[in-house]
């Protein structure tokens, strides 16, 4: 047997396992940044979302994304992963229906497993932004639809041999395919759902709602950082020694400078180095380097990460003021920095890093051609995902409703949705909203259509 | 050097590390599902059990399990891992005393390390079922005995070239060898120990005793799920690209459908999607696919997992009503689904998945021969393990006692056994049993031999 | 392509990822063993320290450590990882400026990534010892200096082809290079900072200050144990099947016997098996086997770990009585056992384990030559590190101060340094120091120069 196939398969499977482990990271970050009364619900969502993704991507998503067919979606190998793929014997003799991914010589099921964990990541990004008010069943249904019908389409455009790939757009490990797509779907959900009760008071007051466990959040980010060493270097889908070593270093460097950028920015703007900002800076750097990790130098990765760290702090403040209520900062991390990272390919790419791919970006004398392709990709993927997601959110709202009752939201979704308490032995502070739910605030609710009307 | 040996060794060691990491998963699941007053004790047990397993398996277990000798246990290479094994130079020239495991060409210590982490898993399964009432020293002693003298014997029968292997029984990664064996040993312990104080009230009342931290429990299951990507695909003990990719996908699929099966079942039976059931469904799917993961199709793995998810919910309810008190559901997950998974080989195996191994199962035209062998294996391993464990539990009870005092059980084992508090900074609810321990309940105790008598 | 380069690179990168993950382990252990009011601060430190290490090691540390030059520090390839290294084509034709590390044939960036995560480990060791009283900014500055200017120098002596390597000192994976160096730097910090307020009462009373979450601490140790399977076996920097299997087993064995040694010792001395001692015993065994893991037999590793477990308990008691306040036991684990492990090479090494390296140690007939070299290495690395660290601590103290105000220390660093609360939903016990800060204790403070004066 050719040892190369075995080595590449090991790399693909092990990195896929690391990406799988990001489910734990997202679960911890999102539950840590939410209130204790919604912890079981968030953990449940982050847990079952990967089960839904597995089934949905197997049933339909994989074929839509990688099947041969049209520039817009796959038409072959559509259901339950059937269809030939002889890629381990690559070369002129390739026979199969997944030609967009025949460049890697690992077995079909290794490719499927690796792509599955990526699809699951996109779905789990949504979970955090819609947390603390969405119905469990509604989130489950959306997850099936996102992974089965939305994610694979833009994925086909960029990674499945579709029209954006033909245009010369490059997204190495998914700043757009995974992160900004997850972010756009989340934004649509947040807009349809509206903010959490109590987040925006009367007279324009913006209330901070602190997360209930920063240790949980920090554990989560460390796990995600580890997972990213699967996400980015694994996207080679082959154990190319020089390239995977390069990507490990650029990925780690952007995380590091993202931390420093966000910490300094929050120290300057908020007077103290807020831990929430520090760890979102890390994630921002990681999201931003995801598209360019294989195309830029280590020095450029340091700059990209640092800028991402600044951007994420400004973005969190912006969404807060724009009254777009995202409990965990998922939009700032995944959407905004997914876009930023995709554009960074057009700015910072250098031909020597991965010859015969992107060529040079704008800052290294390559002109605006690459940057333009990247921008087209950002807009196209964003437009499709946002509107497709919006339609699905509205359909779900019409049939089963999206939001839990106000009473359940105040009491916490753990009891209402699951009948569980996350921390039954511990004495918990009486929620402050029992106070604000009396008096003038109740009046405010009754005047707020999205709170008093159908949810 | 032959690159195959290096590649296989990498695979075996890395997957062994993942299986090792399951110790963290078990520790989190078990402590999360128990009360805060017993947290230190459970963590201590889950921690030290792997130390005991390491020493015990090195001193005696490995040789009993894999040494050449009789169909019932090994007789060569018995103590402290001595004995030649030239397996990296496999073939006709094999010389050594571990011929049952000479089919993999990795160094002896890689085989030992991989098998050691499996032995540790069996021991740690016991920990959860006997939690919240067993003496620390008694559990430590049992762990030494289980890994040194019980586990290796049935292991020899099935994986060590013993009589069940000769009969044509197949257990790819240990639904029986590890999980149901751990489960039988736990069942014996639970029966000897009796239920926790307060679990069963007077007049037949069954009290739910909720776990103190569902985040801890959920973290644990994610870690276990990751660990299973070592457990099952690693059991190839060689980096066969097609097979390990296949096993990654069947393993993941059964976990996913196990989640869905248990969630739907609990939603239907209990009216709400209980998080405890959801995560036990995941574990049930994983245990059930452990034996057949290399022998069944992806579609079959989806069915097996889904059924396991249903079974685990029914089983938890059954044990609860049967007054067999298993705080974490270990019997339902590991024993019941270990049996179910072993039988699934006889039902769902298909020859094309791993040619020249099982042949077809009953549902694919292979008749009842395979299913019968599997059933014999289940019964034989169960009978030996249960009675051997029972004897050792009674011996320990006679010499050092098994159960902490009622006072210590009510106060919590953390103080009584370790002098530590798990959460000294937090205000904890007064335990409800201070209430129930007065009045009629005390009377109930004094009439209950296993509570008032020698423990 | 030569498959060996790909296999070795996989091994180096994957083990480096495991070592990276130790940052999570340290974060959990240190925050779990500290009080809840300082949790955010400790997590922040453990998080940002790796960002600082990444930048500092890239800017200057790597070149100082591995660049060609003098026996005392590197002089080539100094800034930002520039300089040629053709090591994948090793042999006579080697051309580059990092000849001390040209023995491994992986790409330069793989070497850098692996060494970077080691440098980060040394820095994070400091964090625990100085916890609960150091200013955030001061710790950040020290981290930059440690990784940029202290760690690489002794690293050069031993791993960079410097004078200690020439003398025949062996430290396979860093008992000295990483652990005792981190420990010496921490000791200097502890001495300059002084003990936490309330640790030592009037009249010589020693107060125990229990950590706020033993689950967090235990999770951390499991993660560290996993990480050590990267740390030690990865230090081969090549996938040598026999050697990496051997190191996995010796590493695991020492952890196991370290657990048993510390548990028995604390059971004997403290009357109960304290969980904190058990898990420090595990870490002690791991630190002690780090230097000799590739040079000693499995049986010797069992002895080394067991002794380390005894030593760590005695050492914790010693430092406590010596009024050297180390909240997490970092000095006992990393400094004391780092020294012990380094000396164990001189005692337990056997030539057959890694031929043509250490030769036999004292206990196996090799005489005192090796032991003498090891002792010289211990003393030299300790003297340099301790005094260099002391100077930097004093410089930082002079310019920005080292210690938070007494008011902030009593209130907790989370609010004072970060404006965050770790657990805002939970009811926390009123700190006992509000009581002791009144009356005689206040008087005690005003008589204590390091508490009442400039901090």
Image (cartoon, coloured by chain):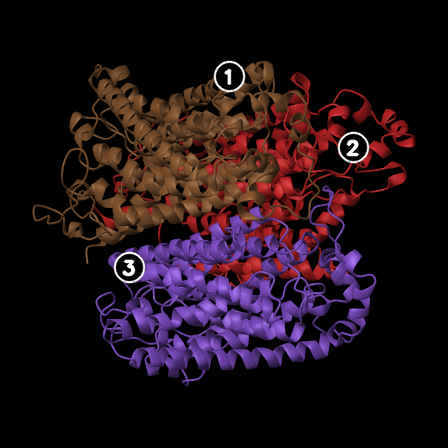
Chain colours: A brown, B purple, C red
Residue closer to the observer: B218 or A435: A435
Q: Chain of mark 2?
A: C
- For the residues marked 1 and 3, what is the alpha-carbon distance in whole angstroms? 49 Å
Q: Chain of mark 1?
A: A
Q: Are marks 1 and 3 on the same chain?
A: no
- Asked if residue C97 lies left or right of residue A356, the reply is right
The numbered mark at residue C197 is: 2
Disc 2 is placed on an element classified as loop
Question: Where is residue C245 drawn, in percent x and y?
Answer: 41, 59
Question: Where is residue C267 drawn, in percent x and y?
Answer: 73, 61
Residue C355 visible here: no
The answer to whether the residue labelled 3 contacts the one labelled 2, judged by CB atoms less than 8 Å apart, is: no
The numbered mark at residue B299 is: 3
Residue beneath the point at 73% across and 41% down? B425
- Asked if residue B194 lies left or right of residue B9, the reply is right
Question: Where is residue A396 drawn, in percent x and y?
Answer: 38, 37
Q: Are marks 3 and 2 on the same chain?
A: no
Disc 3 is placed on an element classified as helix
Q: How many marks?
A: 3
Q: Residue furthest right?
A: C440
- For the residues marked 2 and 1, what is the alpha-carbon distance in whole angstroms? 41 Å
Q: Nearer the viewer, mark 2 or mark 1?
A: 1
Residue matched to label 1: A321
């Amino acid at each position: 047997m050719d040892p190369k196939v075995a080595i590449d398969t090991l790399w693909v499977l092990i990195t896929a396992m690391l990406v799988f482990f990001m489910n734990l990271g997202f679960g911890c970050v999102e539950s840590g940044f939410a209130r204790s009364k919604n912890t079981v619900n968030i953990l449940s969502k982050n847990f079952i979302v990967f089960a839904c993704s597995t089934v949905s991507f197997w049933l339909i998503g994989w074929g839509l994304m990688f099947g041969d067919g049209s520039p817009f979606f796959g038409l072959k190998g559509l259901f339950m992963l059937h269809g030939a793929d002889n890629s381990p014997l690559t070369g002129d003799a390739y026979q199969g229906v997944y030609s967009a991914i025949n460049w890697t010589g690992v077995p079909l099921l290794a490719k499927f497993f690796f792509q599955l964990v990526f699809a699951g990541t996109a779905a789990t990004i949504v979970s955090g932004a819609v947390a603390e008010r969405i119905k469990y069943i509604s989130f489950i249904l959306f997850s099936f639809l996102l992974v089965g019908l939305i994610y694979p389409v833009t994925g086909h455009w960029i990674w499945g041999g579709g029209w954006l790939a033909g245009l010369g757009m490059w997204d190495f490990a998914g700043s757009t395919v995974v992160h900004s797509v997850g972010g756009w779907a989340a934004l649509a959900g947040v807009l349809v759902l509206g903010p959490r009760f109590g987040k925006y008071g009367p007279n324009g007051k913006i209330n901070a709602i602190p997360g209930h466990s920063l240790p949980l959040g920090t554990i989560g980010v460390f796990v995600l950082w580890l997972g990213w060493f699967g996400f980015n270097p694994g996207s080679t889908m082959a154990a190319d020694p020089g390239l995977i070593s390069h990507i490990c270093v650029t990925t780690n460097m952007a995380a590091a400078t993202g931390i420093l950028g966000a910490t300094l920015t929050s120290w300057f703007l908020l007077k103290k180095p807020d831990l929430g900002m520090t760890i979102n800076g890390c994630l921002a750097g990681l999201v931003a380097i995801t598209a360019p990790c294989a195309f830029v130098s280590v020095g450029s990765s340091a700059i990209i990460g640092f800028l991402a760290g600044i951007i994420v702090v400004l973005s969190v403040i912006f969404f807060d003021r724009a009254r777009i209520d995202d409990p965990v900062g998922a939009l700032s991390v995944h959407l905004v920095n997914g876009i930023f990272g995709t554009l960074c390919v057009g700015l910072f790419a250098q031909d020597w890093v991965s010859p015969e791919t992107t060529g040079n970006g704008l800052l290294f004398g390559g002109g605006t051609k690459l940057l333009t392709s990247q921008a087209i990709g950002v807009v196209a993927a964003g437009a499709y995902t946002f509107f497709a997601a919006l339609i699905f959110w509205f359909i779900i709202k019409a049939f089963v409703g999206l939001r839990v009752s106000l009473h359940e939201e105040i009491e916490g979704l753990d009891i209402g949705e699951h009948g569980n308490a996350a921390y039954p032995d511990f004495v918990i502070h009486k929620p402050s909203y029992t106070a604000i739910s009396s008096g003038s605030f109740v009046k405010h609710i009754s005047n707020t259509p999205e709170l008093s009307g159908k949810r």
